[in-house]
Amino acid sequence: MAEYRVAALYRFTRFEDPAAIQGPLAALCCGLGVKGTLLLAREGINGTIAGEDATIETVLEHIRALPGCADLTPKTAWAERMPFHRMKVRLKKEIVTLGQPDLDPTDAGTYVDPRDWNALIADPDVLVIDTRNDYEVAVGSFARAIDPKTTSFSEFPAWFRDYRAGLEAARGPNAAPLKVAMYCTGGIRCEKSTAFLKAQGVEQVFHLKGGVLDYLEQVPEPESLWRGECFVFDERVAVGHGLSPGTHVLCRGCRMPVSAEAQTSPLYVEGVACPTCHDQRSEDQKARAAERHRQARRCEALGIEHVGATFPSRPS
């Protein structure tokens, strides 16, 4: 079995004082050698952490003791290498930023189990909307899903209002009510965006329970309607069916995923640039990136941390 347990989690709940939660949670994670990022806001908690199985379970027990988190069930994956460089516990206005401060994220749409998802999105009367960012959609998506081409989740409300106005004008006043199915990576964005659609008066709103990750884990590949891989926000970069490692890598120049095909391009230089950013980066930027990459590879060969390492302080 792989060495590190990777736990992705979120919970919309009410924290009256997120700052009071931050310190003890950060101290526990750092003390156990757990790494990753956890976001805290009045609306709840969101993040991904990695570490040894027992230490992750200790952190999860701590989180489950927080208000409204008793039945929290994270998504678990395994990695042979630590997928994060450091531990961060941050305070935010929202645990996933939609920019709708008066929205109640607990009033979300109807969950659809991954094994029932195919039948729903195969219905031609159902609008299937991908709530992820454009670079994530480029890595993989469901057949016939609408790509809003957003660069951040906060752009989604404006996109939907415009899209809906154009759609309803084309459908006419006597058209049947909208029926919408939405999905995202792990469930948090589509949970919040379905709450937004309901607040906009759309009554038939559905979302994929557990997101694409649960779908890829539970639905056999021969039955799957997913095309491509699923981008994830850690050093795994992307995963496939069964949550197996994907073929994409991360460009260290622009932080965008690079496909296997793009990796064969002469514009792809590992650790430096990719076809997306190669011509946008100066020679000085490329030189500094190349040196940083050389140092990282040297540290890796020596078995020491390059990013996120903690060193003893120098004597005074």
Image: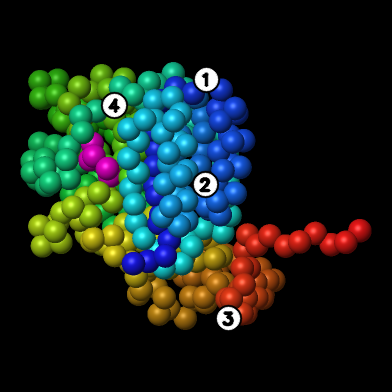
Residue behind mark 2: 37
Amino acid residing under circle 3: Ala
Task: Say which label, 1 or 3, has the lower sequence index.
Answer: 1
Q: Is residue 119 left or right of residue 241?
A: left
- Give the percent coordinates (x, y) of residue 164: 27, 30
Instruction: Please tell me which of labels 2 and 4 falls first in the chain.
Output: 2
Earlier in the chain: of badge 3 and badge 2, it is 2
Say which label, 4 or 1, has the lower sequence index.
1
Residue occupying the far right of the picture: 316
Label 4 environment density (alpha carbons within 10 Å; few <14, some 14–19, many ≥20): many
The stretch drawn in magenta includes residue 210: yes
- Which residue is identified by label 1? 16
Q: CA distance from mark 1 to mark 2?
A: 21 Å
How far is the residue under mark 1 from the one under mark 3?
47 Å
Q: Nearer the viewer, mark 2 or mark 4?
A: 2
Residue occupying the point 43% across, 39% down:
61
Give residue 239's position: percent from left, percent from top.
Answer: 32, 61
What is the secondary structure assignment of the residue under circle 3? helix
Q: Identify the image quadrant of residue 249.
A: bottom left
66 falls in the magenta region: no
Q: Nearer the viewer, residue 94 or 310?
A: 310
User: Hey, which quadrant is residue 263 in on the image?
Assistant: bottom left
Which residue occupies the foreground of this view, 145 or 279?
145
Q: Which mark is residue 108?
A: 4
Amino acid residing under circle 1: Glu
SS assignment at label 4:
loop
Q: Position of residue 69 (x, y in %)?
A: 39, 30
Q: Is residue 253 left or right of residue 62?
A: right
| Residue at mark 3 to residue at mark 2: CA–CA distance | 27 Å
Q: Is residue 279 above or below residue 88?
A: below
The residue at the point 65 percent across, 62 percent down is: 309
The residue that label 3 is drawn on is: 301
